[in-house]
Image (cartoon, rainbow, N blue to C red):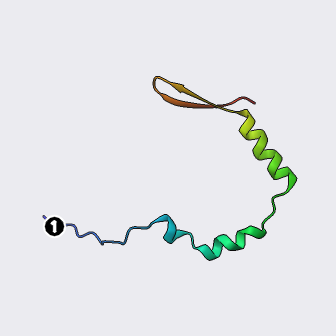
Amino acid sequence: MRSSKTKKTKPQYMENLYSKKSSLNRKNLNPSKETVDRILNYSKALSVMNTSIGKVESLLN
């Protein structure tokens, strides 16, 4: 029987995955009115209900 050797990797933390430099470049992004409207309409149509089996999400469109 062979022993399986696993390669130990360094844990990836959120602060290591997303650099501060890339977040600074995102300040110049401006979403279009259509994009904002689409997100707002989706959030208005989303309904989340707590039930005995867990949370149930449904779209009301």
Report the front residue among 9 and 31: 31
Judged left or right of residue 15, residue 61 is right
Residue 9 placement: quadrant:
bottom left
The number of numbered discs placed on residues in the rendered structure image is: 1
Which residue lies most toward the bottom here?
A: 21
Q: Quadrant location of the C terminus?
A: top right
Residue at 63 percent of width and 77 percent of height: 21
Q: Quadrant location of the N terminus?
A: bottom left
Query: Looking at the picture, which amino acid does disc 1 mark?
Result: Arg
Q: Secondary structure at mark 1?
A: loop
What residue did someone put label 1 on?
2
Task: From this view, report whether residue 19 is shown above or below residue 54.
Answer: below
Residue 5 placement: quadrant:
bottom left
- Residue 18 locus on image (x, y percent): 56, 69
Judged left or right of residue 46, residue 14 is left
Which residue lies most toward the top here?
A: 52
Residue at 85 percent of width and 50 percent of height: 34
Task: From this view, report whether residue 52 is shown above or below residue 48.
Answer: above
Judged left or right of residue 55, residue 5 is left
Task: From this view, report whether residue 40 is shown above or below residue 48.
Answer: below
Q: Residues within 10 Å of mark 1 (few under 14, many from 20)?
A: few
- Residue 20 locus on image (x, y percent): 60, 73
Which residue lies most toward the left here?
A: 1
- Residue 44 locus on image (x, y percent): 74, 35
Report the front residue among 57 and 27: 27
Residue at 27 percent of width and 69 percent of height: 6
